[in-house]
Each structure stands twice: as C-alpha cells, then as structure tokens.
Amino acid sequence: MAQPLKDMINATSVATLADGVAAAHGAFPRDRFVAGALAGLDGRELKARVGHVAQALHAALDLPFPQAAPILRAATAHSRLDMWSGWPATDYVAVQGVDHLDEAMSTLAVITPFATAEFAVRPYLDRDRDAALAIIRGWADSDDEHLRRLASEGTRPRLPWGARVRGLMSPGPTLPILERLRDDPSEYVRRSVANHVNDIAKDHPDTALALLRRWHTEGGTYTDRVVRHAARGLLRAGHPEALGLVGAAHGSGTVESLTVADTVATGDRIPFTVTVRAESPGPLLLKYAVRRDGSRRVFHLAERVAQAADDTFTLARSHSFRPITTRAEPPGPRDLDIIVNGEVRATAPFTLLP
C-alpha cells in the first residue's frame, strides 16, 4: 500500500528544512525548531502538518518577515529542499508575508524550483490581485520552467487543494499568462496551462472554447496536445464544438453489441464487452457512464480512429466497485451507458450487491 501523503511531512523533512535554515542563519535554534515541529505532528492530516511546521518555523526564527525572507531564500542553497521539506517554508511565506508583497513573492520565486508554491501565492492574489498578477506575469517570461509553471498553476481558478480566489473566477485576468505559455517547450508548464483552461471551461465554457478554437487555428509545436488536454472536461460532457476540435463528429458511431454481467459484489469488478461501428472515417471518442438514482459518473473507455465507414472495434473492460472512503456506493440497480462521440448509443442494466 502506498505511503499516505501526510507521512511525507516527517522527521526527515523537518530536519532537511532545519539544516538549510541553520546553515543560512547561524543564530537559528535548530534543535528547538525540530522539537517544536515534531511535537504533535503525528495526529494531524497533511495540510495541518504543513501549517504546524510553518508555525514552528515562525516561532524559532522569531524575526520580522523582511529579515526572515532572505534567510529562507539562502536556505535553498544549503540544503536539498524538496516538496515535503520546502512546503512548510512556502506556507510560512503565505501567512507571515502578507503585508510585504514584493519580498514575499521574491521569496516564493526562489523556493518554487524546490517546492512548488502555487498554494502560497493565493493569499496575495486574494489580497491584491492586480499587483500580484503584475509580478506573476513576469514569471511567465522566466528561464526557469518551475517559475513559468507557477505563473499558470498558482492562478488556476479551481486549483485542487487551493483556496478559491474570487478575482480569478472570471477568466480575463489570467489569459495573458496562458497565451504566453500555451506552446511552452516544457511539458510540465504545458500541462498546467491545459489544466488551467479546463478549470475555466467548468464555469465559462464559451470562453474556453473560443480560446481553444483560436489556438487550434493558430497552431504551434505542441498546441494540439494542449488543446486536447484542456478540452477533456468538455469532451467528457460530449460538447459538439470540443469534439470538433479533435476531429470527431458529434454523435457519429453506433454500438453493435454490449454485454455486461448481471451482478457485481461491492469490492469486485464488473466486466463488460462492447463492439462499436464507425459511421464515417475519423476519431471515435468512447466513454462509459455508470448511473443510479441521483448519480451519473463518466469514465474514459478508449479512443480509436476509423479509416473507413463500418470499421468496427471490440473492447473488453471492467469497472471497479472497490470501496472508496470519499464516496459511498450503495447497493442496488445500475445502468451502464456507452457513449460514442458524445452520444449515448447503448445501455445495459446490472445490480450492485452488498
């Protein structure tokens, strides 16, 4: 079983941060910081651990932020910081530096190649969006891919785990950043751009589609891949224009046969086999949905390219009903839908048993 992420904030990560700060600032009470950071750590979840270590760092440094910030920047040269050892440092900046925008953003820019600072920029965007964005737009021109990626990731409207920033929920302010980075040479950066546009599409699909349509028309070395990844939510929803962007004809294709087991026990997988026939040459984007009263979830099935009308494709798959703590699956009747280029083309019933 994979190690829980919260356990990555541990004695080793605390010691790594402590070593860097101590090397940069001889007066830093390293042992006191480590003791304070580890006290009560085990009983906390991931983000609470990060905040706890950041608070211990604040107590140990015991300096005004303008004096503490250069120490944190220097610490990156003295210790091998990574996401887990550096995250509390970015959290420290997010909390303690809110009255010192320029100093705080300069510090996050130095730390982010070691521990990405997308969560830490959110308070500054919330407090003074325009001033923070002016700095962040400069990051989009950096030679460092981590800083360019931070420009896109830190300003995402729906950043996972990140605090919502009201001023980012309308897409206009971040579009110049995305324009600058849409064909970036770094896949790390491009994936963030695509995720950012996918966020926009959830609230402003017309804006996202207009942007992607123009990018698709203008082209670029990597643009097609960015457009496809950015449109994934719209493709999952079967949006006709999004399908057109990837060359798929909305509703084109039929299901010749679909077989599904009658029952599946909670914790098991239900197998199904489907044969799809193309109606014209071109891509077939295949999804499936599992439905019950009050719930419908869509999943990727496959993508195939038909060379001619009447090409057929047979796929054998299975769907897991392994219990997940964040989502309860009550037993009872279900329907399995097969979706071809945005349209449901076949449905079969089954029953989830306790």
Image (cartoon, rainbow, N blue to C red):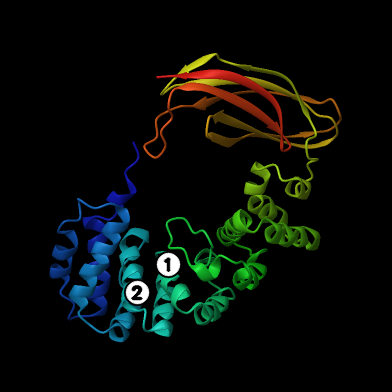
Vertical placement of residue 220 versus 312, above or below = below
Q: CA distance from mark 2 to mark 1?
A: 10 Å
The residue wearing badge 1 is 117
Identify residue type, mark 2.
Val
Whether residue 215 is visible, yes or no, is yes
Whether residue 76 is visible, yes or no, is no
Instruction: Please state if 273 lies on the left or on the right of 26 as rendered.
Output: right
Vertical placement of residue 56 versus 260, above or below = below
Residue at 37% x, 60% y: name it: 83
Can you give x and y, in whole percent of width and height, for residue 339 in the image? 68, 32
Instruction: Please state if 152 lies on the left or on the right of 265 as rendered.
Output: right
Q: Quadrant of residue 23?
A: bottom left
Task: Specify the label residue 61 is tagged with.
Answer: none
Residue at 78% x, 47% y: name it: 244
Outermost residue on the top side: it is 262
Identify residue type, mark 1.
Ala
The residue wearing badge 2 is 93
Q: Are marks 2 and 1 in contact (CB under 8 Å)?
A: yes
Q: Is residue 76 or residue 346 the one in the foreground?
A: 346
Q: Is residue 260 or residue 281 the one in the foreground?
A: 260
Can you give x and y, in whole percent of width and height, for residue 88 in the image? 31, 65
Can you give x and y, in whole percent of width and height, for residue 132 in the image? 49, 78
Residue at 41% x, 74% y: name it: 108
Q: Quadrant of the C terminus?
A: top left
> Which of disc 1 and disc 2 is earlier in sequence?
2
- Classify 10 Å Cα crowding around label 1: few (below 14), some (14-19), many (20 and above): many
